[in-house]
Image: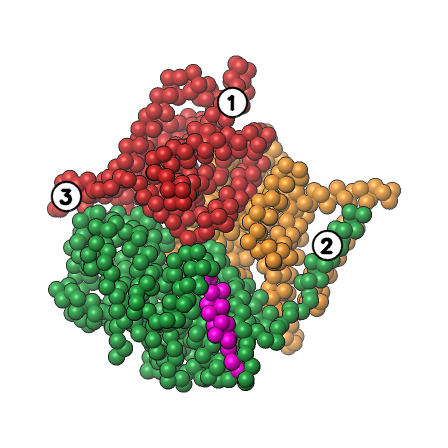
Amino acid sequence: MKKECLTRVIVFSLLSWFLPYSVSAQTVKIGLISSVTGPMAAVFKSEIEAAKPAAELINKKGGVKVGGKNYMIEIVTGDDQSSPPGAVSAVNKLLQQGVMLFVAPMFIPSNMAISSICEEAKALRVTPNCADLSLFAAPNRLNFNGEASYLNVPHVYMKLKALYPGTKRIAIIRPDDPGAKAITERTIEEIRRQGMEVVFHEAYKIPTEDFYPLLTKALQTKPDAIEGIFAIIPWMRGIINQAREMGFKGPIWLVSACGDTNLLKAAIEPKYAHDIMQAAPDLTSEKMLPIVKEFKRLVETETKTALNYDHIQTLRALLIIVQGIEKAQSLDPERIAKALEEMESIDMPYGKGRFTGKDLIGQNRLMRDPIPFSRFVKEGRIEFEFLPLK
Amino acid sequence: MDLTPFLQSIVNGLALSGIYILVALGLALVLSIMGIVQISHGEIYMLGAYIVYGLTKVLGLDFFPSLLISMFSVGLVGVLLERLCFRPFRGSPDRAFTISLALILILQNVVLSMAGGDPHTYTSPISGVLRFFGVAISWKRVFILIVGFGLLLLLFVLVKRTKVGQAMLAASQEKDGASLLGIDIDSLSALAMFVGCALAALAGILMGSLFSIYPTMGSFALMKAMAVIILGGLGSLGGAVIGGLLLGLIDGILPVFTTTHIAGMVGFGAIILVLIFRPQGIAGHE
Amino acid sequence: MSRRYIPFLLFCCLVLLLPFFLRGAYHIHILILTMMNVILTASLRLILLSGQMSLAHGGMLTVGAYTSALLVLKASFPFWLAFIMAGLFAFFLAWLVGYPFMRIRGIYFSIVTIFFSEMTVLLAQQWEGLTGGSGGIYNIPRPDSVHLFGVKVLDFSSRTGFYYLLALIMLATLLVLHLLEDSRFGLTLKAIRQADILCESFGVDTTLYRVLSFAIGSFFAGIMGSFYSHYVTAITPEAFGFLFTVYILIYMIVGGEKSPLGPIVGAAFLTLLPELLRPLKSFTPFVYAGILLAIVYFLPEGLSGLILKWTERLGRGHA
């Protein structure tokens, strides 16, 4: 009797493997590939958490309207395990399930690994944020960059120079990550263009939380400011707290971001929370658009954690896909891509944006929209604004 | 020549030594002296930190009471593990190894599902910076240094001067002979696990107050603890001091003069060399 | 002698015909992963035969992957040559570090191999000029298609070509490992594991045998690294970290290390299990842990031990 049961269980399990996956006529499946596990999981966790609330937000407004019909969004997550082989597994699985629209991994090696597979399958990707521009240039035709930090660099530095005109010597302490490397190269270019000097530049292993040795080296070069490029809050916490402990009183900034400004504030000592800046939002500010406020409510109810910068990344990518579908009035990736390329104005969480980049990479694949800029003035008081597009 | 960075790096190195010794003490007792193949020691370390996080952030208790509660409860967990998982397989290190592998998976994922994979933080009431001769070090780190070396001294005295300690040393050198002499290996192992796990928890708690906690923080602790023990000598507490100091100074000073990656390689390389040319470690006896 | 090989031949047929029954690139992909794990687990077992529990496979995979990728990209080697070179490089590296490592026994040997793997990761991250640093290497080209008498036999533009290549490699590997184990070499290894001092007194150079088994096992890890990098077309330094090697170890333990069937059963079972348990995805580590504990407490011979007991009972039933 027992043996029969066991056989049945095995047979059913194997059968379920072979049965076709069901596709609902009224939903659009969007794949989200990111690092659920592995060393990069901490970095991308919020992005994955935000999937359900983001889909809910869009579905509450009626979902996506194509040809007079309303389609609900369903997000299917894939785990790249922080590595290219994992990404290849994940994308294969999702493609087999019939998914043709993706929020692609922000981890550059993973994104690269799936590029050729997706281009062959003619699947559309929106990468929420990526500093490596080659991923969006030919032969990749269907990859869109949801937030090109690369393009933001000159604008952020213009603002920084205005706030701290006397700054001449900059120390760069950045994570050892390909995305950070790409932004750093652009940043160094910009620093020199503005007449400043890079007196120190080192990449720290991910994850690092003890910055005493690195800071000892960096502070020896007597910098006026410290540039972190991009980080997550635990690393920035280490850099800020420890730099200030060691007596550094100058500005510390991130040309990109490390997370929501409020969360950063909670992580550092109040007496050290002065003259710190990043191109990230204060998500509690009144200046935030209604869609962000609503999203905040959904995310905080669903995940029981505060709304985070990385949650917004997912929303950005989804908004792009949804508006692309509606403009093209089609679910065909190539037609959506064409629509996105040509749209004059796309509603983003920070305002109106559009895809640019033809001059840089030959096709409009880089999103340009208002840049959030936060600053700790004194004892953690936050000043926040959107930098204008020019 | 400006000596300050050099001085600062030595201070950094010493602070790191304190951390490494603290982390290695528990493992030295359990693995090195009592021979229990406890690979999930890092997860015990992590558990201590998360319990304090739960007590302080969720229940609102103060830091030091939470610390004591956490140490005690983790110690008890250790005793339980010894009884259920390690005592039945005392003779076969391979099976003990496999069990601790399973424990790693279980502990990491229980914490992951309960607290999430996000790094969390809590703080200790110790704050402020000690400054002298142009060198700066936070009081938190000084505290860890004091606790680390202090506990080491205490353990040293206890092991050398008390009967229990002597019994442990005897058991570590020759288990069967010791039990023939009437030494109760079972109780000794339980005691070693209690103390060892409590020490691991303490290390995790203090580290967590300095940095942030996340479910996989144990692997760092395990690697460093193993490195210290191997470097300093198997079966020797004095070796743990030497190993901790050496490793701490390497990790504190080297990155200032080269990159972190190279410093890491030197660290591993030193251990491999020691294992090859002096397998019993610098001060070990086997 | 020929009767013993019947099960193996049946297995070969199964493996070679399987793609015809499957739909979808994803399923083939899972089978490719399974076969990789089988090869890695089986080669790890060879090293264990001499009594050394090595965790250096991760490091050898990294070395093999980068060697192959760099030879093809920077020195324009054809894939087949780079593939062999990757294995040989791993072999010689293992030979080099093997001699000093063999002086260390027991768990400390395993720890040293862990450190070795970690060092390869650090080296790959540090040596940016050669390895591209933490970003790794991408756009690694797939192998050229294989032509036999003017007919295209293996084509690598789709997953199926990779499947057949790996299937052939796996079958060859299993055969080679089995022959090694059954030979005098294998017997000597097992003897060394049980009583190395006794062997030494018979004039056997135990260190040489140990190093040789370590080096041969690492060869297979090396070629797997090469396969991986040309299959996934992108590699990063941490792709084969500590956790990856631990999983191979787990496959071996669950499969059972006494029998040559062990690696096949263990790797296949544990690679396919998460796919069958898809709804319970977050519980996978617990299931793994539970299986490990069950093996230790109830099934020390592993799953292969269980299977062998069943087949024995069946055999006896017929008699």
Q: Determine if the magenta segment contains residue A49.
A: yes
Question: Would residue C234 be seen by someone viewing this image from the given angle?
Answer: no
Image check: C249 left or right of A199?
A: right
Q: Determine if the magenta segment contains residue C60.
A: no
Q: Amino acid at mark 1?
A: Ser
Task: Chain letter for orange, please.
Answer: C
In the rendered image of this protein, does residue B54 appear above or below residue A137?
above
Q: Which mark is residue B187?
A: 1
Q: Which residues are magenta?
A: A48-66
Q: Residues within 10 Å of mark 1 (few under 14, many from 20)?
A: few
Residue B277 horizontal/vertical position (percent): 40, 35
Question: Would residue A4 be seen by someone viewing this image from the given angle?
Answer: yes
Task: Chain letter for green, please.
Answer: A
C61 or B136: nearer the eye? Answer: B136
Q: Amino acid at mark 3?
A: Gly
Q: Who's the residue at 76% across and 55% down the image? A: A8
- Are labels 1 and 3 assigned to the same chain? yes
What is the quadrant of the C terminus of chain C in the image?
A: top right
Q: State how far apart marks 2 and 1 are (Cα).
A: 46 Å
SS for dot 3:
loop
Q: State how far apart marks 3 and 2 are (Cα).
A: 71 Å
Q: Who's the residue at 54% across and 57% down the image? A: C223
Residue B220 horizontal/vertical position (percent): 40, 44
Q: State how far apart marks 1 and 3 are (Cα).
A: 51 Å
Chain under numbered label 1 = B
Which residue in the structure is indicated by mark 2? A9
Q: Which mark is residue C240?
A: none
Which residue in the structure is indicated by mark 3? B134
